[in-house]
Image: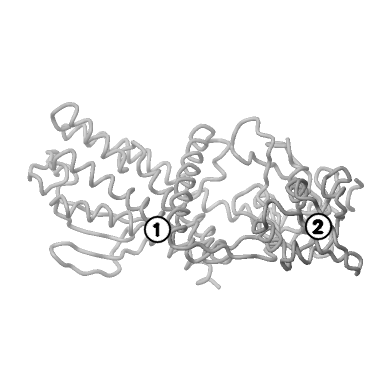
Amino acid sequence: MVLSTVLPGLVLLGVVIFVHELGHFLAAKWRGVTVIKFSLGMGPEMLGFTAGGTRYCLSWIPLGGFVQMAGDSPGDDGSMPGGGQREFLSHHWFGRVIIAVAGPAANLVTAYVVMVVMCLHGVTLPDFPNLVGTLDSGTAAWRAGLRPGDRITALSGRSVRTWHDLEDAAGRRDRGTPLAFSIARNGLPVLVQVPAGESRAVLGDLAPESSPAIVGTVATGMPAYRAGVQDGDRILSVDGVTVQRFEEIGPRLRGKVDRPVRLVLQRGGKSFEITVSPISADGSRGSQHAVIGVEPPRGMTWVQTFTPLEAVRAGFTGTVGLVSTVYEGMWLTVSRPVYYRDYVGGPIFIGQMARDSARKGLDNFLYLLAMINLAIMAFNLLPMPLLDGGHIVLAVLEALRHRALSARAYINFQKVGLVLVGTLFVLILSKDIVRPFQRMRALDRAPRETTTVAPAPH
């Protein structure tokens, strides 16, 4: 049990850290800078070996890694290294930029490769029964003769067993031909003919029958997680309005960002009420799209596969999209630190996400691996001391000044970085440690603080 919970996180963090440090290592070797030590992990050495003058080791604390290069810090006497091009700080400024950029660049390349592998493996997507969902009487589909609850068994001669089959059949049809729906309604076969001119409108009106308002997954760290919602809970009402289907939850949350919302849940045959504060789905101020971090149960699925060429293209598009998402998230964290402090996590949080994604399937785990690689890339490129971005700033500053920084200036710069990065690390790690206890407290409190509540009338 412990292994299945911890192992995905260790694998994910291990890959991300290894490729990052490998990027620095290879760039340093290429530029002729002496590498003293390559460590995966921090703290005391667990095991290792020496080859080619470099010590390769695995250390006990799996919270990072490092590449120690000759001359990468001022000497004990406060002087800057003067060993020439084989020492990092006395190396040419452009070479130092290459070495610093190589780590984040390795994460970027890895993320792209992982996205391509994910596409080649196949992406699991949700599917639904071939039952027509809610349909208003004024729609083109209603006028054509389709009704809610109809089971579509074929479309224009193509067999339909799931909703994906229907969408696939609709995509393969000849655009200029009429549609013929074969339907089972109340145990009787029905044929619905749709003229070619109305086919697009009819198909656009159709949606699958939605799933019951049962929580399949609670996203770690999200409002529902902190409020004590569990997998398997049935949501009976949202702010006094009864919900029957999962798809009704989103509209009931609309316009309620940062506002307390009362949920009536059913768990183990008992009903109780909790309060949750939704957040903005896209992080923008004034957004009406509110989310609490719950997903429906994973029922029917289908796997989208790609040819190698399609995977290369889709991997590029997906990587670009993830880069945009990561930087948007970083901007929100910087611009609204108080609001988003609960959604920032460190190694424990990443481990929880890795565990949850691994349970959903390899494609989900690979997607998270790509995203964490890009998050590490973006974070390390920040122009802060101790980070790769800080080394880049110092190297460029040296190029502009046409002379190296003094040992005192360099040491002071690193001290500032140590305070900033150390403070940030403590805050993130403390949030990592506190989050599970907040979750346990919410789970213990929710059923006990309320009495049994009947579903609210519509």
**From the image, which quarter does the C terminus lie in?**
top right
| Along the viewing direction, whichever of 163 and 214 lies nearer the viewer | 163
Furthest residue in direction left, as rendered: 83
Residue of label 1: 113
Q: Is residue 430 left or right of residue 18?
A: right
Residue occupying image coordinates x 56% and y 51%: 434
Q: Earlier in the sequence, mark 2 or mark 1?
A: 1
Residue occupying image coordinates x 36% and y 44%: 380
Q: Amino acid at mark 2?
A: Val
Q: Amino acid at mark 1?
A: Val
| Along the viewing direction, whichever of 55 and 212 lies nearer the viewer | 212
Please, what secondary structure does the residue beneath circle 1 have? Answer: helix
Residue of label 2: 132
Tag 1: Cα neighbours inside 10 Å, few (<14), some, or many (≥20)?
some
Q: Is residue 114 left or right of residue 125?
A: left
Residue 30, image x and y in percent? 17, 53
Q: Is residue 442 left or right of residue 12?
A: right
Q: State the separation of the CA atoms marked 2 and 1.
A: 39 Å
